[in-house]
Amino acid sequence: MSEFVLSDGAFRLGIMEKVPMPKEGECFLLYQDGAGKDDSKVINYGIKYSSTEIRRGKYNKKAVISLRPCVIRHDQKMILENENFYFDVSVKLSCSLVDVRTFFFIDNCPEEEEIHSIIRAAIKSFDGEWNITQSHKAQGKLEESLTNKLNSYSGMKFRSEVSVTPDKDAAKMVKSNVDTEVEIHVNKNITDEKISKNQQKIRIMDSENEIKEKQIQELAAMMANFGIMGPVVNEYLQGNMSGTDLYDRIIQAKTNDLNVLTTTAQGEFLTDKEIVERLNEIMADKKYLPVGTERKVSEKVIEKKEMQEKEIEEKAVEENIGIESIPLSDGDYL
């Protein structure tokens, strides 16, 4: 690239002259006219060189070379699979010299227009290959292609910055697709959440129904075994009532039954036999706590039960519940 060669002319170093010093960011290339790379010398900024050595080299030409990078910019459109859309491609290419003598003497360094042609051809080679969602992939492939093509030039180093983006129309299409995908994703998440909540509610309801059904079955069993005392016995078996409280409730129930029997007997609604049978039922434990119950109360509760039953018997005698204690007159009947 001729942009790096700032000047090229005759050179002669006099006997009393010092070796010339290039500016910062530049260098001198001393060489013999008609000679090649091996008969040349690079003079860099900030380094002292021997005048004698330079004179011995018999250099008669001096080229001033710029060491600053040369930047090339190239913009072009890349056609997509759908020919109605394009990618906007922007390439920033930085070129710098890594070997001044190779660059100068080997005639294979491209000119700027040649580099533009290389970039243009690389972009065109990908026409019709990508869809509007593949800009990043297209960018990577284009960078790789440019690197492979430009590394063939000796003495130079190229660094490319490539940007591939959807053009205005393609960008609208991409945004539309993204919005649609986001909406679908959000709706799916909301739906999944609702389904999860509903399933959890169903599981909770099923569990609650199972518990209620079990409770009903247990209560039905209690009622079958203990009659109206079933719920009370169920509370005791579940640990919600002490044995003392249970027998207090049983004795209270017996007392209530005795009171009812007393009222009934006094009203002469039952025969003597029915009164005796009813009294035996009330005084028996089987009605209130059948034999075979899995839980047993403490001895202290049993003792209290026996004492309370004795008091009930005495009260029954006092109130003339017994058959023999009921006076009958001629013509009277129960």
Image (cartoon, rainbow, N blue to C red):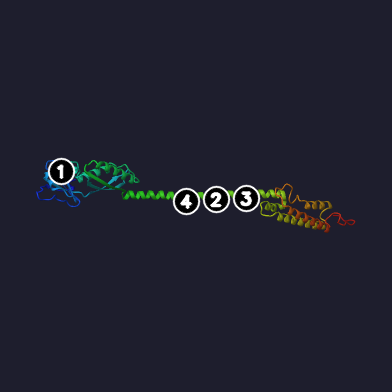
SS at circle 4: helix
* Residue with the most extreme left position: 15
**Residue 152: quarter of image:** top left
The residue tagged 4 is 190
Which one is earlier in the sequence, the residue at label 4 or at label 2?
4
Q: Residue 201 bears which disc, if any?
A: 2
Q: Image check: 228 left or right of 147?
A: right
Given this view, does label 4 or label 1 mark the residue nearer the observer? 1
Q: Amino acid at mark 2?
A: Lys
- Residue in view at x 82 percent, y 52 percent: 276
Q: Residues within 10 Å of mark 3 (few under 14, many from 20)?
A: few
The residue tagged 3 is 212
Q: Residue 40 bears which disc, if any?
A: 1
SS at circle 3: helix
- Residue 298 appears at what percent x and percent y? 72, 52
Spatial distance from mark 4 to mark 2, Cα to Cα?
Answer: 16 Å
- Residue 167 appears at what percent x and percent y? 31, 49
